[in-house]
Image (spheres, rainbow, N blue to C red):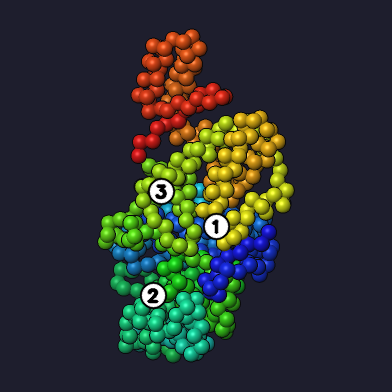
């Protein structure tokens, strides 16, 4: 099986070849934990979770190492901690736990590593000192350490290779302030003094004075240090949202390569993948527009798989128009597939050959074509339904096995169909409904229509929808969202 991906660095769709097939590595920029994650934050998690699952299917579960960091040093974290009068760890632990729980509700597997910035301060300081020693960074009069972009770019244009933009265009587009302490407008912060009341760490040593520079790291150095510490270089795949291409990922490449004396951006990460934005009626999600949708709120109204299906319903590289209808469509589609799987619950699975698996994974091997994979699932579900109707056991077994194999790589159809339709109903409600269904069957068999109508009304009062099929009646809770 050969995976093809769109590599942002080369700007082309390429065949993926890992540095070491026995240890395939992937790093994805994770959350800054000071608040709840919005649905836009969840898109890269779900997209790269599919890639993680796909890589494990290709190379083996024990041969893929996935790191997704947590940024727990940040101005917004500091402000929230000050507002609440607590240590930053109270804020970051709280929202990191919520984030992980919310992403798990979307069927995202936990990454192999989840490094935190505060656990890798020595790695950041060591990298900064290496950059200073190579004259790729310098200490300002006010105690900041800045990266010298010219030391990496050298007029070659390599600094803008990932963003496909010139240095001048990036400076203008970012509206970079030409501060007095900078040698050049593009230079960026690696380390800075902490403000009063903010957390502080022993920093790199100022070579001119021999003294440590207490303070805290800049944003970009965190990911460079953490990714190298847990994965080693070069990383096979580095991922994240399109908004991170510049300045974050551009600066990661520059400082990581400069720290080791490399000029080729691929010395840091061989391949780069970026997901597109979520749109709301053509507008980007924004607090100022009041259209921010939190995952924490969505999972109260929709099963995680519905949200996940919706997030995968468009090409990961393009925009995704987010609205209520996309969630309802996703729920309806999953209901139909689960209903067929419920009918096929007694059909045993068969072992798929490697050739079969390669065919099943073909949609995803073509740069994670999740919409095509979803279409493929729907077609296989229809075929499975047909085989059930004609009692074609062998075909039903093979089709169900293929369907669930692809679904597992997509992180979809992970629930028992009966549990899916009961929607988390309590044991008491389940027992009450099952008893009513027994009474209903007896009343219908006796053609006692008044009693059957009474039971129907009782089920409606419980918000239960009955689904009659060849194998008998099943039920589900009606949608109330």
Tell me if I can see residue 127 in this picture: no
Q: Earlier along the polypeptide chain: callout 1 or callout 3?
A: 3
The quarter of the picture where residue 197 lies is: bottom left
- For this rendering, which residue is in front, 340 or 142? 340
Determine which residue is flagged by label 3. Answer: 326
Asked which secondary structure carries label 2, the reply is loop
User: Is disc 1 placed on a helix, strand or loop?
Assistant: loop
Q: Position of residue 478 (x, y in %)?
A: 40, 32
Q: CA distance from mark 1 to mark 3?
A: 18 Å
Q: Which mark is residue 215?
A: 2
Say which residue label 1 marks: 369
Cα separation, mark 2 vs mark 3, equals 46 Å
Can residue 362 be seen here?
Answer: yes
Q: Considering depth in this image, is 29 or 157 the residue closer to the camera?
A: 157
Report the residue at 37% width, 20% height from top. Answer: 458
Q: Kindly report the distance in space between the C-alpha atoms of the residues bearing marks 1 and 2.
A: 45 Å
Q: Label 3: state its secondary structure.
A: helix
How many residues crowd mark 1 within 10 Å: few (<14), some (14–19), many (20+)? many
């Amino acid at each position: 099986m050969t995976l093809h991906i769109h590599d942002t660095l080369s700007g082309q769709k390429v065949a993926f070849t890992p540095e070491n097939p026995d240890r395939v590595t992937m790093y994805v920029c994770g959350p800054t934990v000071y608040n709840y994650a919005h649905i836009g934050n969840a898109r890269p998690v779900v997209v790269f979770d599919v890639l993680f699952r796909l890589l494990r299917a290709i190379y083996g579960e024990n041969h893929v190492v996935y790191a997704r960091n947590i940024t727990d040093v940040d101005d917004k974290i500091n402000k929230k901690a000050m507002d609440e009068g607590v240590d930053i760890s109270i804020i970051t632990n709280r929202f990191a736990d919520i984030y992980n729980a919310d992403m798990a509700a979307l069927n995202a597997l936990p990454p192999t590593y989840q490094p935190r910035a505060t656990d890798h301060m020595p790695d950041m300081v060591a990298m900064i000192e290496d950059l200073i020693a190579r004259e790729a960074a310098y200490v300002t009069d006010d105690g900041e350490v800045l990266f010298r972009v010219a030391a990496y770019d050298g007029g070659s244009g390599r600094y803008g290779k990932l963003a496909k933009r010139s240095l001048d265009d990036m400076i203008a587009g970012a509206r970079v302030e030409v501060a007095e302490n900078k040698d050049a407008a593009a230079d960026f912060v690696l380390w800075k003094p902490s403000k009063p009341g903010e957390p502080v760490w022993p920093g790199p040593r100022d070579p001119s004075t021999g003294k440590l520079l207490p303070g805290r790291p800049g944003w970009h150095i965190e990911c460079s240090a953490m990714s190298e510490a847990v994965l080693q270089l070069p990383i096979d795949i580095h991922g994240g949202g399109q908004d991170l291409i510049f300045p974050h990922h551009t600066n990661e490449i520059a400082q990581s390569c400069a720290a080791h004396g490399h000029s080729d951006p691929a010395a840091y990460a061989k391949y780069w993948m970026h997901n597109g934005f979520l749109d709301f009626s053509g507008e980007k999600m924004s607090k100022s527009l009041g259209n921010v949708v939190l995952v924490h709120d969505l999972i109260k109204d929709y099963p995680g798989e519905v949200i996940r299906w919706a997030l995968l319903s468009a090409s990961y590289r393009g925009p995704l128009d987010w609205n209520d209808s996309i969630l309802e469509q996703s729920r309806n589609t999953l209901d139909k597939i689960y209903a067929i799987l419920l009918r096929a619950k007694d059909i045993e699975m068969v072992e798929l050959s490697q050739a079969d698996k390669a065919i099943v994974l073909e949609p995803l091997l073509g740069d994670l074509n999740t919409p095509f994979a979803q279409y493929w699932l729907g077609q296989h579900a229809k075929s499975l339904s047909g085989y059930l109707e004609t009692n074609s056991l062998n075909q039903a077994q093979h089709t169900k096995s293929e369907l669930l194999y692809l679904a597992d790589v997509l992180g979809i159809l992970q629930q028992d169909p009966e549990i899916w339709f009961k929607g988390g109903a309590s044991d008491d409600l389940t027992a009450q409904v099952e008893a009513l269904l027994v009474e209903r069957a007896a009343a219908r068999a006796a053609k006692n229509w008044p009693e059957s109508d009474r039971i129907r009304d009782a089920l409606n009062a419980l918000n239960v929808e009955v689904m009659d099929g060849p194998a008998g009646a099943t039920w589900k809770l009606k949608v109330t969202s």
